Image (cartoon, helix red, strand yellow):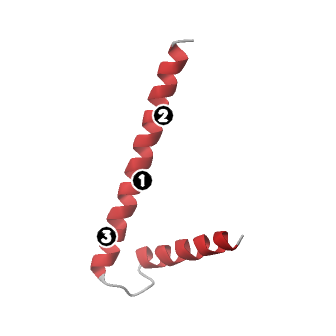
Amino acid sequence: MMALVWVIDIVVTVVKILGGRTQVNPVLRVGMWVALLCVVAVGIAGVAGFVILLERWLSTL
């Protein structure tokens, strides 16, 4: 349960940094945005790959 609190705390801190409410180095903020966009792109690619594999599996039934 304590791990969930830590995760929520980290998410809140990251959102504050990305939103500009916390003063940090601009390079850090840009790097975090790039990292977030990469994670989103990997997630979309993963979902697309899963859909393709599911479609291939369902076509063999």
Q: Residues within 10 Å of mark 1 (few under 14, many from 20)?
A: few
Q: Which residue is mark 2?
A: 50
Left or right: residue 30 compared with residue 55: left
- x and y, in percent, of residue 6 in the image: 61, 75
In the image, which disc is placed on residue 49? none
Q: Which residue is mark 3?
A: 31
Q: Relative to residue 56, is residue 41 depicted above or below?
A: below
Q: Relative to residue 48, is residue 26 depicted above or below?
A: below
In the image, which disc is placed on residue 40? 1
- x and y, in percent, of residue 12 in the image: 55, 75
Q: Relative to residue 59, is residue 35 depicted above or below?
A: below
Rendered residue at 44%/28% (across/down): 52
Quadrant of the snapshot with the C terminus: top right
Instruction: Using the image as rendered, state which of residue 2 and residue 30 is in the foreground.
Output: 2
Marks 3 and 2, how far apart at CA: 28 Å
- x and y, in percent, of residue 31 in the image: 31, 70
- x and y, in percent, of residue 15 in the image: 49, 73
